[in-house]
Image (cartoon, grey):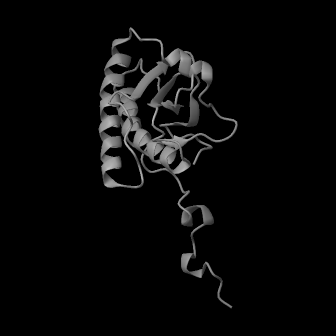
Amino acid sequence: MMSGTAWARGQDEATILGFGKATDGCYTEEAGQRQGTDEGIVTAQIPSSDKDEIRIAGATVKAITAAWNTRVAEGHGLEPFDRDDAITLGFDPVQKVMYVWAQDGSGALAGRAQQTHFQDVVTKTACPRLLAEYNANKRWDYTHWAIAAYQGNSAWPQLFTSGNCLPTENGP
């Protein structure tokens, strides 16, 4: 008798379903590991005086915004944000986490699928930049990231996910 998964012999279920190891340099955090926090995002919103943080944040926000606009133009059931400056980035120097958040007054990130697309755009755009700085600048120690959105008129963000641009020994 032939099993229903015989065509995938040698592959585990996670690989078949697309949950294999990350190949783009970004890894989603697992339970028990560092996560984004409300305190961290509040700290990340304080304007930085660090020249490297300012440089990386400015260039990365522009790149994420362009990548999101491209993703929206491709379709995928996505809507553009209702303002040009909807995407913001900041750093929490205490937790050593980069936070990316969107002001989402129109509900562009209301659904899980839209949030997943946003996470994909952010990680594929931000991680290479964080890793390049990490490899070039001995003082740079931001490799963790967290993604959030302020939905509607909410005063508190919804933290979607967080992760690390560097692989961990126990990670995927």
Q: In the picture provided, is 171 more to the left or to the right than 144?
A: right
Q: Is residue 65 above or below residue 97?
A: below
Residue 30 placed where, x, y %?
Answer: 64, 42
Above or below: residue 41 compared with residue 72: above
Picture residue at 35% right of the left edge, 55% below the top: 75
Indicate the quadrant where residue 57 lies. top left
The picture places residue 23, in percent across and down from the top left corner, at 44, 51
- Locate residue 86, reporting x and y percent: 39, 29
Which x, y percent locates residue 155? 57, 22
Residue at figure coordinates x 46%, y 32% from the top left: 105
User: Is 67 drawn above or below residue 87 in the view shown?
Assistant: below
Return the residue nearer the eye: 33 or 100.
100
Q: Is residue 143 left or right of residue 71?
A: right
Residue at the extreme top = 49
Question: In this view of the protein, which residue sits in the foreground, 83 or 26?
Answer: 83
Which quadrant of the structure image shows residue 50? Answer: top left
Residue drawn 38% across the image and 18% down it: 53
- Quadrant assignment for the N terminus: bottom right
- Examine the rendering and report whether any part of residue 93 can be seen: no
Q: In the shown orientation, is residue 52 left or right of residue 102?
A: left
Q: Which sits in the foreground, 154 or 94?
A: 154
Residue at 32% x, 30% y: name it. Answer: 84
Q: How many marks?
A: 0
Res 140 visible: yes
